[in-house]
Image: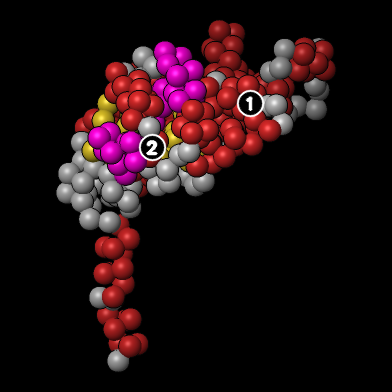
Amino acid sequence: MSQNKPPHRQEILDALEKFYFFHTAQHYDPLLNDAARDNLSHQDFLHRLLDGELAARHEKTVLRLIREAHFPFIKTIDSYDWAHPTKIPKSLILKSLDFDFVRKNEHLIFLSPSSLGKTHLSIAIAYAACQKEIKSLFTTAADMINHLVASKSDQSLERALKKYCSPRLLVIDELGYLPLDKQGRDLFFQVISKRSGTGSIILTTNKPFKNWNDIFEDNAVATAIAERLIEHGELIKIEGPSYRIKARKQKMLDPELLDQNK
């Protein structure tokens, strides 16, 4: 940059920060130098300035949403092994990435035996939603219920319910691995009911709807929850052998390991 600072430089920087244009303020001098080098018109310079500011704000928003989503780990659609399942509706899953189902407050229900990647896919979709600035939250069914039960004892249930009802997209993982008692199923029903028409859910489960009575131990509640999800939801059924069993077999057949065991 020239030794002679542009006129009104500090006043402009102060104004930029007052308008929360922090990225532009931070890169103000390089932006001016680039504009002069490229002989930009006032309009082109303004476009470049605003484009850079919006890109920086988007990146900051995405990072915040990913942090607030509380993913246990990051997974992407590209890293999913589509060849492993014997049956999977790939086109339907890929179509979900247009997030039309979120705009319509609809749901996705992933059904498969354990270790076929339904958690991977649910996180990948929610992670992609964060990239689109869609507020998302990941939780297991057990963690959500335990949090809601605990909140009743300290009179913070409404605040806890808001945590699970306010995100546009809520991922509830591992429904069906443990049965729910009366308090648990009532709280689970509250979340599903409060989100009806106001947000989307991605649910993963290892039990088909006909066996949900085993989870909720109350046929009426199980039916009511299933109907609310099915009415505005899409069932995504995945079939095939367990990833863990496959990995174990591959490990057993590893030539290096076989040599070590000789």
Question: Measuring 51% from the left and 46% from the top, which residue is drawn there?
Answer: 72
Q: Does the magenta stretch include residue 207?
A: yes
Residue 202 place in picture, x, y as percent:
39, 31
Question: Measuring 45% from the left and 19% from the top, which residue is drawn there?
Answer: 193
Question: Measuring 33% from the left and 88% from the top, which residue is drawn there?
Answer: 261
Amino acid bearing label 1: Leu
Q: In which quarter of the image is the C terminus?
A: bottom left
Q: Tell me which segment is drawn in magenta.
A: 189-214
Quick one: which residue is furthest to the left in this view? 86
Q: Tell me the tag on residue 217.
A: 2
**Residue pointed to by mark 1:** 157
Q: Quadrant of the N terminus?
A: top right
Residue 178 seen in this snapshot: yes
At mark 2, the secondary structure is loop
14 or 238, nearer to the observer? 238
145 or 53, nearer to the observer? 145
Q: Is residue 4 above or below residue 252?
A: above
Amino acid bearing label 2: Glu
- Place residue 146 in its image quadrant: top right
Distance (Cα) linking label 1 and label 2: 23 Å
